[in-house]
Image (cartoon, rainbow, N blue to C red):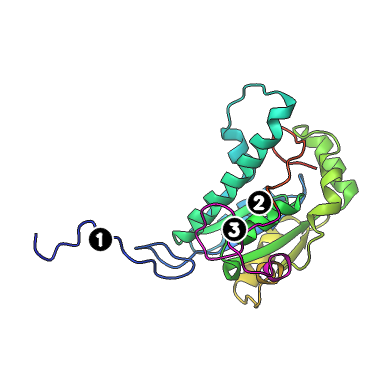
Amino acid sequence: MPGSRRGVVPEPQGPGTVPGRTPSGLIVFLNGTSSSGKSSIARELLRILDEPWFHLPVDAFHAMRSRREVAPEELPPILRRTWMGFHRAVAGMAAAGNNVVVDHVLSEEWRLVDCLGLFDPRNVVLVGVRCSLDELRRRESARGDRPAGLAARQFPQVHSYGPCDVECDTTATDSVDCARQIRSYLARRSFPTAFEQLRAALLPDGHEAVGHTLFPGPRLERGAPAAGSGSPTGQQP
């Protein structure tokens, strides 16, 4: 048919977009140890934020995996692939213009580096979800669905990378007030973002990330992400 554009692939519209879609959505990135209260904050954010938001919890991705037993030596690469797939699912949702709340455990540096190469750093709000070690131990014991000592093993590393855009302490502050604090920050975001600063520090050469990327960005050139032992939930120490 004359004038038909069938088969013509539209040109990308620039960083943070996919053809035919709106600009990149925001990512509220909740980083904290297991049992720190990230999921509760995410649920409150979805309740109080005006625009449509999606909550993408990493535990939901681990729950999708088949329940069959695997040999100990098989588990680390399975967990690594799960985390990497989770990161790319988040990036894809944001690239399509969706606002996303992510709860994450940055207990290994490669996880952060992978995200820095995949997400549009200007559109990420990094939230440090803190909690005292004593309270983490109490919650972990009460919930009974996490390996004993998991939060304590994650505790030294999770918040060791540098700046956050927002910090919440759930030791004595409930999830409602934490969500309100994050909502207040979203209305007056400051720049450069924590992700922009971390990307400049950890990936100063501006290489692209390993594998397919949805945003122009750094490449992980430190070799393959380190594999380590982990629990069935993938929340490694």
Residue in the picture at 82% in, 59% down: 160
Residue in the picture at 63% in, 75% down: 189
Could you tell which of marks 3 and 2 lies nearer the N-terminus?
2
Is 139 above or below relative to 180? above
Residue 81 appears at what percent x and percent y?
Answer: 61, 40
Q: Are marks 3 and 1 in contact (CB under 8 Å)?
A: no
- What numbered label is drawn on residue 209? 3
Q: Is residue 212 magenta?
A: yes
Q: Amino acid at mark 2?
A: Asp
10 Å crowding of disc 1: few (<14), some (14-19), many (20+): few
CA distance for labels 3 and 1: 28 Å
Q: Which residues are magenta?
A: 199-222
Depth check: give the residue in front, 168 or 78: 78
Depth check: give the residue in front, 2 or 29: 2
At numbered mark 2, what does the secondary structure look like: helix, strand or loop? strand
Q: Amino acid at mark 1?
A: Val
Image quadrant occupied by the C terminus: top right
Q: Main secondary structure of the magenta part?
A: loop
Instruction: Specify the quadrant of the image occupied by residue 83.
Output: top right
Q: Nearer the viewer, mark 3 or mark 2?
A: 3
- Does residue 76 appear left or right of residue 137 in this picture? left
CA distance for labels 1 and 2: 38 Å
Residue 56 appears at what percent x and percent y?
Answer: 57, 49
Q: Nearer the viewer, mark 1 or mark 2?
A: 1
Q: Residue furthest left?
A: 2
Q: Are marks 1 and 2 in contact (CB under 8 Å)?
A: no
> Which residue, given by chain and number where applicable, does mark 2 sit on?
103
Q: Is residue 78 magenta?
A: no
CA distance for labels 3 and 2: 21 Å
